[in-house]
Image: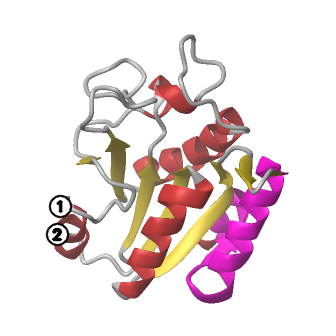
Amino acid sequence: MKNTVLLLIDFQNDYFPSFDGAKWKLEGTELAASNALKLLEKFRKESMNIVHVKHEFLNEDAAFFTQNSTGAKIHNTLLPKEGEFEVLKNEVNSFKNTNLKEILDKLQAQNIIIVGAMTHICIDAVVRASSDYGYNCFVAHDACATHDLEFNDIVIPAKMVHASFMASLEFAYAKVETTDSILELL
């Protein structure tokens, strides 16, 4: 795929259950990161464009991703390398008040492969915004993670949250595939 960018969203320590001191553990983060790493390695091998997005909350009493904290750092399995773009965001949508759109325009991006966390928040927001900007979006569903949600005393298991959002994104915003299927497209 020509003019393709890998967009890694919020693979930060606070989301990893295996990270000592993680403040907002997600279900399946390690597996999602492992699959994201497959894509990252392919992009690096082929000298393709990579953008890492990291979230930090501006308020000091945030539940996780507090500014300059160890928990807000990108997990050591997916650290950016020289020549890869990095975007710092303070909002759910990776485009809001950041230079992400400018980076993608500079790279003449047509296709964006999206991986990361959380499925129901930041992944949902960036996929919808990317599609609205006219990019062809691909989501590696097995390279994304989330957690259980609760609404009106109903607990929705992470597996169902993830499936619901992937089904929604696939309907109108993105091609939702496995990591291996996306690797075959490259």
Residue in the image at 68% along x and 60% along y: 141
Q: Nearer the viewer, residue 35 or 17?
A: 17
> Is residue 1 visible in the rendered structure shown here?
no
Badge 1 amino acid: Asn
Where does residue 51 sit, x and y in percent of width and height? 33, 53
Residue indicated by mark 2: 102
Mark 1: give few (<14), some (14-19) or many (20+) Cα within 10 Å.
some
Residue 28: image quadrant is top right
Residues rendered magenta in the picture:
155-184
| Residue sitting farthest toward the front | 152
- Name the spot of residue 3 as percent of width and height, x first: 35, 76
Residue 107, numbered circle: none
Judged left or right of residue 176, residue 69 is left
Residue 161: which quarter of the image? bottom right
User: At which x and y percent is residue 18?
Assistant: 65, 19
- Magenta-span inclusion, residue 162: yes
Circles 1 and 2: CB distance less than 8 Å?
A: yes
Task: Name the residue: 23% across, 70% down.
Answer: 101
In the rendered image, the quadrant that contains the C terminus is bottom right
What residue occupies the far top of the structure in this picture? 20
Element class at badge 1: loop
| 93 left or right, relative to 75 | left
Q: Can the viewer see residue 94? A: yes
Residue at image x 43%, y 67%?
126
Residue plotted at (43% across, 59% down): 6
Report, in whole angstroms, how far the alpha carbon at label 1 lies from the one at label 2.
5 Å
Residue 50 falls in which quadrant of the image? bottom left
- Vertical arrangement, residue 74 with respect to residue 20, above or below: below
Few, some or many residues within 10 Å of mark 2 (<14, 14–19, 20+): few
Dot 2 amino acid type? Glu
Tag shown at residue 99:
1
